[in-house]
Image (cartoon, helix red, strand yellow):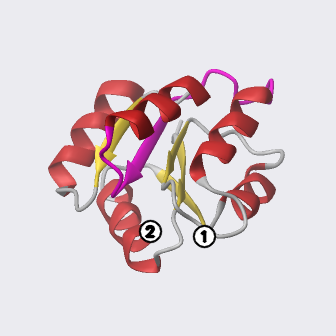
Amino acid sequence: MTKTIMTVDDSASVRLMVNFTLRELGYEILEAENGKAALKEMEGKQIHMLITDINMPEMDGISLVKKVRASSAYKFIPIIMLTTESQAEKKLEGKEAGATGWIVKPFKPDQLIAVVKKVLG
């Protein structure tokens, strides 16, 4: 069965790079430009992993993580923060919200692949 990954970033180029990198490995990729759009896109779908930016319009990544963790359907899926934020307090805020891991942008495709394989198997 193909695993589905939702990628959320207000930058189309970042979404494209994540999509290109992970689709080659056989994952199905869903995309959204902010947290609000992501929640709508995820409705009723089986999502195996969420990769999200923090700084986005309408709904930021931390708020998205909290909403996803509050949903019984997605309570235990791996959530990776993919962001330019690297401060310890932001990482702690992400972890407390329910993030599984953290990748700082700009990222190398190999780095993303390694993290996805580690958490999704």
Q: Quadrant of residue 34?
A: bottom right
Residue 45 percent location from the top left of the image = 75, 45
The residue labelled by disc 1 is 33
Q: Quadrant of residue 109?
A: bottom left
Q: At label 1, which amino acid type do we have? A: Glu
Q: Residues within 10 Å of mark 2 (few under 14, many from 20)?
A: many
Please check the rendered image and state whether residue 31 is part of the magenta-colored stretch, yes or no. Answer: no
State the CA–CA distance, disc 2 to disc 1. 8 Å
Residue 96 percent location from the top left of the image = 55, 24
Instruction: Decide if residue 60 is in sight here.
Output: yes
Residue 17 appears left or right of 61: left
Dominant secondary-structure state across the stretch colored magenta: loop
Q: Does 101 appear above or below 107? A: above
Residue drawn at point x = 30 percent, y = 26 percent: 118
**Residue 15, labelled with which disc?**
2
Marks 1 and 2: in contact by CB < 8 Å? yes
Residue drawn at point x = 76 percent, y = 52 percent: 39
Looking at the rendering, the stretch of residues picked out in magenta corresponds to: 71-87
Instruction: Decide if residue 121 is in sight here.
Output: no
Q: At label 2, which amino acid type do we have? A: Arg
Image quarter (top left, top right, bottom left or bottom right) of the C terminus: top left
